[in-house]
Image (cartoon, rainbow, N blue to C red):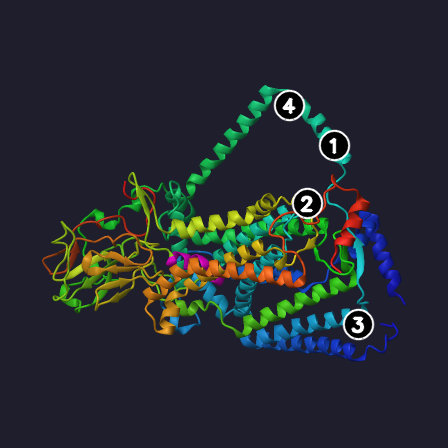
Amino acid sequence: MSRAPATRRAVAWLDQRFGAAGFARTALNKVFPDHWSFMIGELALYCFTILVLTGVYLTFFFHASPTEVVYQGSYAPLRGLPMSEAYRSAIYLSFDVRAGLVMRQIHHWAALLFLASIVVHLARVFFTGAFRRPREINWMIGVTLMILAMVNGFAGYSLLDDQLSGTGLRISYSIVLSVPVVGTWMASLLFGGEFPGSDIISRLFVIHVLVLPALIVVLLTIHLAIVVRHKHTQFAGPGRLDTNVVGERMWPSYAAKAIGLFFLTTAVLCLLGGLFQINPIWLFGPFNPAQVSAASQPDWYMGWLDGALRIMPGWEVRAFGFEIPNPFFPGALLGGLTFGLLYTWPFLEAWATGDHAEHHLCERPRQRPLRTAMGVATLSFYMVCLLGGAADVIAVTLGLSVNAVLESFRLAIFVVPLVCGWATYRLCVELSARDGLPARPGGGSGGRTRRSTSRRARRRAASTAGPE
Amino acid sequence: MAEPDPGDDGPAETLAAVSFGLATVAAVALSVVFWRGGQPQAEGILLAVVCGGLGVGIVLWARLATPQDHVTEERHLVGSTEAQVEALASDFEAGGAAFGRRRLLVGLLASAGAAFGAALVFPLRSLGPRPGKGFKRTAYADGQFRLVTAEGEPVRVDDLPLDGVVTVWPEGHTRDGDAPTLLIRTRPEQDLRPRPGRGDWTIGGVVAYSKLCTHVGCPVGLYQAEEGLLLCPCHQSTFDVLDGARPIFGPAARSLPQLPLGRNEQGELIALGDFSGPVGPGFWDRDR
């Protein structure tokens, strides 16, 4: 029985240095509500951890240099071809470095899952109203994290200087160029001149491995610190009130489950990385600005952008000798509007409903038909965009004319969100009627403010209002 | 290790033990795979077994070691009491008052900050050249160039079959990003309708257009000879080669710029000047 005294000694030693025994004990006893949907944000965190670990390994072998070299390595089909040092080092690390390919593929799969879990996490927070006071700022930090993750994913796969990523870079260059007034300056400063320029790979590398990851780490830390400060939201239920948190303690149940989930996430990513080929750059070949292959599609989280570019009819604005080019509208304006709406949603909703009270209970989507309908309509809009990015593939697969498919998408982009939104609204109203709960299109909501009610009155109100 | 066995948690404990055992075996096997030079599929599977074994084992262990009942923690309002907020605000104002009374200093500090910020913008200017004429001209503007393929070979009309397409550059500029040009040989029976003033820009049914799509600059790669249509594989913009490469479908809003073609004494195709307009994607002052 020598273990206990050793633990005691270690705890005492540390406390004498930090005096944090009280704080640490609170942390160990922190309560986490138990609902599967609260796990999705965690999943994003674990993906990010894997991204950092595999990414560090990749940087040991990748050279972000545009210098032209002639390939003489072990992959025979590319031998003798001129290519950039960046592309050559990516081929080298894929074929000649131990675990290089598996690390690269795990890294790429982890990026896809990272973005997927962020989007689902965002949807969960949105549809359950978990962005309401006091969590508005954390919602905005979350939206920022999603944008940073998207940009960093794009920067990452654009580093390799293969034919596909070069095409993606060219498109993003053109979108930057399309911005009114400052577009040409922005494009020139970012790329170091006209496309392709000689600087973009090395600049993207610094952005991808230093600037954005550092920002993500900082914001992620704040994101989690705010979660600790607010404590988690929870769904209403027996004993689950606006004034408490019911769940498992951090130590040992939650910690063990979290570590277990981390390893299970890693296991899935390893399996994907080992067995399912992703971004086989050796098949795409080195980037040649004069070439492009059909069916060039970006990673899924950039697919909406590519689809929106395709669906947009050939309009542009020209007046007084100036022009706003076509890609500006789907490429820059659409994204700006979307993210602007996401950032301001908590405030817009509070303004529209007049509900400025503090909330800690999650709502069920059916309780808020209008919000849920708008969320579904927005998601379906982006789903149409995403599918539009595969318009040519759809046309070829179904044996239809590409033009006909794209024309249908131009219609669907308006019709599908309307239909989905309307159907969702009806469904929510029906479901909440069946539950015997009045749906609340607007208006107050059992929330709390310090000024309006005393503690005891609140407690009483909350326990009587809680569903049975 | 001298702890007494918890005993009756049989199946779960056995399963956790098996998971950890499996992880150990897979880790050893992973070492062997790496030692033998590596094999991506085997590495992926073994890594997955190691991590999966650890994950399953830990979760099972947690389930059997910890009580499953829920605990309740009280939650308090996030905001502080009004008195606390009041105290904070007055402390802050008391400290700030010392600064606030000196109007001149505040103004000077602000202008120093603004001037410093402005000064720091200038180094960014080195990130790239001024976006001037470069966006509106290509190497073709520098003279009359022979048109050559990627391999540097000059092109004669008869090198191109009917309906044939070849990508060319001004000689000596085959690496220029803005100069790739499509030579297309139309069939005599096709109704090639040149734009006003460009009647003599074609040679023997061969027309030359910039290869860069006017949408977002992808190389316009696919030629549907039957209809004389050029298709951009990126976003499906379609251009009518017979009608000045006018966009007839998709997001592109402008014709592909045309290159005036000529012939030298050897019968090789040359460019008589620059394209009819700026190539590639649009930008704010393109028409200026």
Find the distance from the CA under tag 2 to the CA under tag 4.
Answer: 34 Å
Judge from the rendering whether residue B82 lies leftward or rightward of residue A205; answer left or right. Answer: right
Instruction: Tell me which label, 1 or 4, sits earlier in the chain.
Output: 1
Q: Nearer the viewer, residue A227 or B25?
A: A227
How many numbered callouts? Answer: 4
- Label pair 2/4, CB-CB below 8 angstroms: no
- Label pair 4/3, CB-CB below 8 angstroms: no
Q: Nearer the viewer, residue A146 or A445?
A: A445
Residue denoted by label 3: B64
Residue denoted by label 1: B86
Tell me the amino acid under the disc marked 3: Leu
- Label pair 3/2, CB-CB below 8 angstroms: no
Find the magenta span and give its range. A299-311
Tell me the amino acid under the disc marked 1: Glu
Q: Are marks 1 and 2 on the same chain?
A: no
Tell me the amino acid under the disc marked 2: Ala
